Image (tube, grey):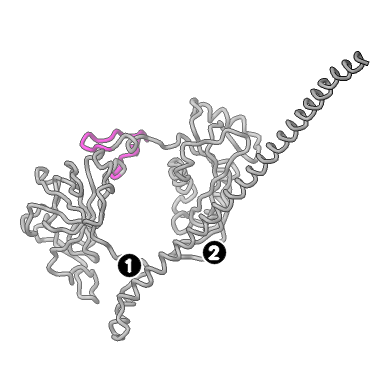
Amino acid sequence: MSSRNTTATSAAPVGTSWWLWSSGIVGLALATTATVTWRVAVRSQRAYLEEQRLAERRGRIRAEIKLRTLVKESQRNGRAHPNNKKEEESSASSSSAHDLQLKCIGTVVSPYTKRMGTPRQGSLVPSSRGYIQLSPNISPETMEGMEGYSHLWVLFGFHANTNYSTGGGSKKGGGSSKICPPRGGGKMKVGQLASRSPHRPNPIGLSLVSIEGQEGRVLHIRALDLVHGTPVYDIKPCVPWDIPGYHYNSSEQEPQTIPKALRVPSWVGQDDALQRVEFSQSAFQSLESCVKDGLLQPLYTLENDGIAAAQNTLQEILAQDPRASTQRGTTNTTTRQETYKVLFCQVEIQFIVTNHPHLDNNNDDDDDDDNKMHDSLNPNNTASVHVVSVTPVNLDPASFVEGIPLMGNN
């Protein structure tokens, strides 16, 4: 009796261990299945939310465009005077859908008290000094990073003009369409818009000044041609591309160096253009057909060498990588290529950005030759743009807001 009891007692732990081990395996399997199911659900939910976000972004852009249009219409209607029919008709005839109301962001403190004695160009008096005092409602943070630049464009108003009637440029409105430029000695006249005259259809000027430094809302400048108290509507840093002919030498097609007199931050001065833009054979043939069918007229036609000119323009556009800033600098590295689209006249350009030597959706017989040609031109296999298709677009069904079509991908 005692020996059987001992055997039965010692066997119990063995059964318990096996049961616990089996339960652990089953639990682990269930936990793994639950984890996989959870991950699949998370991925599905993420894909759904990303699609919703994209749809909301498209809707927000459309709403912002419509709101902008409504605000402009309200501003135009507010400038009319319904109680004065004649004045209302005059306002309606002279107003435009693109009329703009500017807000002053600051004023100029200058040694030039009156127009008399103010230089015609600031660079003619490089030692002159002054400063722009930003308005209290403009934060000093708006000028953060300005210290990296040497020159600045100032958009201002000719507030000291004494005769605004000469700014109409219309015989009907009593304005003059021609002026006598100072350097002409009073013996010649040129068109108002072909001069630097302060008397213009809109009394707005653009001046290039040298940046000396910043203190809070005060931006110190030199080489200015601005009368004291001049209202400032905007300021923008001067970059190398503001210099005519800077980017490429027309004869050698080689990048030029930034002039020593001009200083810009390193991120502005870098050459980030993509090294190569090529058309697939089918894309180029489609471009030819679109030009022949008049889809790019009146800018690109058979009469003005439109096929070659359109291709050249598109190559220059795509070399600057028109994708969103979050996508710039990325390339396709898999066999599944992400396609991007731009609208050019009445055609849609589909392209990819990749490190692969050559891609052509048509699998043409001359692919090998194209690969060899690309390898010789692009030995470092740097990022390139490949135009895969050029497709006509019917803009008739699209709704337009201020001349801009609202497409399905807006």
Magenta stretch: give its range: 242-264
For image coordinates 84% across by 23% down, the residue present is 15
Q: Quadrant of residue 151?
A: top left
Label 2: which residue? 398
Quadrant that contains the N terminus? top right
Q: Quadrant of residue 249?
A: top left
For image coordinates 65% across by 40% down, the residue present is 362
Q: Residue furthest front?
A: 1
Q: How far separated are the C-alphas under marks 2 and 1? A: 24 Å
For image coordinates 18% across by 41% down, the residue present is 213
How dense is the environment of label 1, judged by Cα within 10 Å: few (below 14), some, or many (20 and up)? few
Instruction: Give the amino acid at mark 1.
Output: Asp
Q: Residue furthest right?
A: 1
Contact between labelled residues 1 and 2, with CB atoms less than 8 Å apart: no
The answer to whether residue 92 is magenta is: no
Q: Is residue 357 above or below residue 100?
A: above
Label 1: which residue? 99
Residue 287, image x and y in percent?
54, 49
Magenta span dominant secondary structure: loop
Task: Please count the marks in the image.
Answer: 2
Viewer-proximal residue, 161 or 25?
25
Q: Is residue 369 above or below residue 78?
A: above
